[in-house]
Structures are given as structure tokens and as C-alpha cells.
Image (cartoon, rainbow, N blue to C red):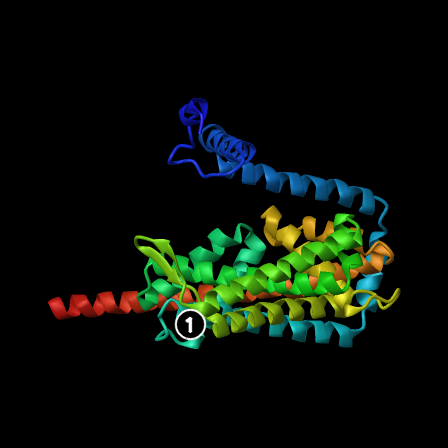
Amino acid sequence: MTIDDRQQPGPRADEAPGPAGARWDLTALRVVGGFIDRRIGWHRIGVLFSLTIVGIAAFALYHMLHDINLSAVGDAIVATNPRHVAMAAAFVVCGYFTLTFYDYFALRTIGRSEVPYRIAALAGFTSYSVGHNVGASALTGGAVRYRIYSARGLDAIEVAKICFVAGLTFWMGNVAVLGLGIFYEPEAASAINQLPAWINRSFAAAALVGLCLYVTWVWLKPRVIGRHGWRVTLPAGPLTLVQILIGILDLTFCAAAMYMLIPDQPYIDFIALGVIFVSATMLGFASHAPGGIGVFDAAMLLALWEFDKEPLLAGLLLFRLLYYVIPFAISLLILGIRELGLSIAASRRRREERARSL
């Protein structure tokens, strides 16, 4: 070793070994991330991203629908096969029934198995139907859940854990459905993102590999995430498969409802429609618009360009009625009756307390 070699400084203890370019990239990412956090705020970035999606969707909808024949849309709604509408409604019911198991599964994951299914079903159905329609579903759905679960003794931290586990179920279901669907039929995704089929299939394969790695990770030993007062033990391997299955069933029922309402011609197979539907739903979810309105519809109209616009729009409107409007009205009715019952019970308790104090 030469004198020059001995005097050459080595890497600092807090620096990871590796190429200088890699360390520079990591430092640059930290600087940019810190600047955004201090000067702009990640929340504003999220709002800007959502507004961008909504703006693009509004522009696309205008160009696709500016010459739409509204009377033809009405005629198409009236002409829709009642049997198809009834089957779509049945699939919607099955979808919301599956949604109730998001909460039921989450309650058992966080160790609150004493909460009965009927309470989980009430919280799951009302929180999702309200969140779907009002927008910002993580906030609005969480508020509905807290109102219901707090009456059973759950605190805000436990409700947050339920929201996390339910959200994990939703996202794993999306990854599984989109991964399998796009890998099998990548051209369906290309109709929305305009990427070559081989790129979409590569993304799908990577997503499925990632999902398999996650299942393997939680299968090997119990995994706990979080810190301090917020810690969640993730479902073990077999339960994670159940979790993924719940998400797959939910999305499959929703896609089946949409499939029953689109025109019969030209023909499109269920897997292709499922990929398009779930992708459009994800875009609507990312926009945080109430019900993904505008964004979901623009994505569906863009991807299903081969269909006549009036009959397709009629199907989209019927789907909104069945999946969004009617469940929302039922949820408001249920929550209103529940609040009235709680108010009457509280008034009765106060009268009894006053009577005992006299």
C-alpha cells in the first residue's frame, strides 16, 4: 500500500458502501423530498395530482360527449333488458355483502373478535357506500366506522387499524385481479394507458411476483408493523390468502354487474372488461372525486371506444344508480334510524337518572 493509498479517505460510517453515483442519487432524493415536505407539502402534491386527473377526465369527457344524443341515451336505458338489470343488481348485492367481510376480517386481525358480524356488516356497508359517494373515502368512511365502533368500546387507534387492514385487503385484491387479468389479456390495459401490450404484461408479472413475495414474507413468521401505540400484526400466510380472496370476490362481483349493463354488441369477454373496469375504478379512486365521477366514466368510454356511446353511457348511468345511488340512500336511512334510536335511548337514560336522583 502506498502513502497516497493510506491517506485516501474512506467512506464515512453513516454512508452505505457502493458507487458514488448511487450515493449521490440517494442524497438528491432526500434533498428533493425534504424540500417538498418543507416548502410545498405532500398533501398539496396529492391534491394537485387529483385535480390533474379530474381535469384530464373532464377534457376527455367533453370531447367524447359534446355531440351525445340525450334522447338516445334515455331510449337505451328504457330498452335495457330488465333481466340484465336484475342480474346486475344481484351482483351489486353480492359485492356489498363481500365488502362487509373487509371489516369482519380486520376486527379479528386486530384482536377484537368479540364484535359480532352484524356490527361489522353495518360499519362495512355504510362506510363504503358513504365513502364511495362523498369522496375522500379514507376520511369519510373512517368517520362512519368510528361512529359505529366507538359505541362498542373501540378507540380511534383501533378504528384506524381496521381502516388499514381493510385498505390492505382492497389493494391486494386489486393487485391480484389486475395482475392476473393484465397478464392474461394485456391489450385490455393498453386501451386505457396506451402502453404496448408487452410492457403491461411485464408490469402485471412484476405485480404478481411482488404479491407472492409478500405472502411468503408473512407466511414465514408473524410480522408486526408500526411503532409505539400503533402496531398491527399482519395476517399470517393462510389468512393473507383469505384476505386476497375477499378482495378478488368483491371486484369480480362489481365487474360482473358492469358486464351485465354494457351493450351486447360488439362482443367483449369478461376478463377484458374486468381489467378495464378495475383500472377505471382505480383512476376514479385516485382522483378522490365523489364516486370517481367523470374520471371512471371517461376511462370506460375511452377504453370501450368500439361501443356506441349512447348505449354505453346508458349502462354506466344504470351502474351508478345500482352501485352508488341506491346503496348511498339505504345507508343514509340506516344511519339516520340508528342515530334516532341512540338519541331516544340516551334521553330515556337521562330521565331514569333524574328519577333515581329525586
- Quadrant showing the C terminus: bottom left
Q: Nearer the viewer, residue 119 or 19?
A: 19
Frontmost residue, 187 versus 286:
187
Residue 299 appears left or right of 109: right
Q: Which residue occupies 53% across, 56% down? A: 131
Q: In this view, does 40 lie to the left or right of 49?
A: left
Residue type indicated by callout 1: Ile
Q: Quadrant of residue 344?
A: bottom left
Spot the residue most to the front: 1
Q: In which quarter of the image is residue 236?
A: bottom left
User: What is the x, y in percent for residue 321?
Assistant: 67, 62
Q: Position of residue 175 (x, y in %)?
A: 61, 60
Q: Residues within 10 Å of mark 1 (few under 14, many from 20)?
A: some
Please name whichever residue, 170 or 345, is drawn nearer the observer in this view of the structure: 170
Q: Taking 343 as reference, is 56 left or right?
A: right
Front position in the image: 346 or 195:
195
Element on which disc 1 rests? helix
Image point 65% across, 65% down: which residue?
177
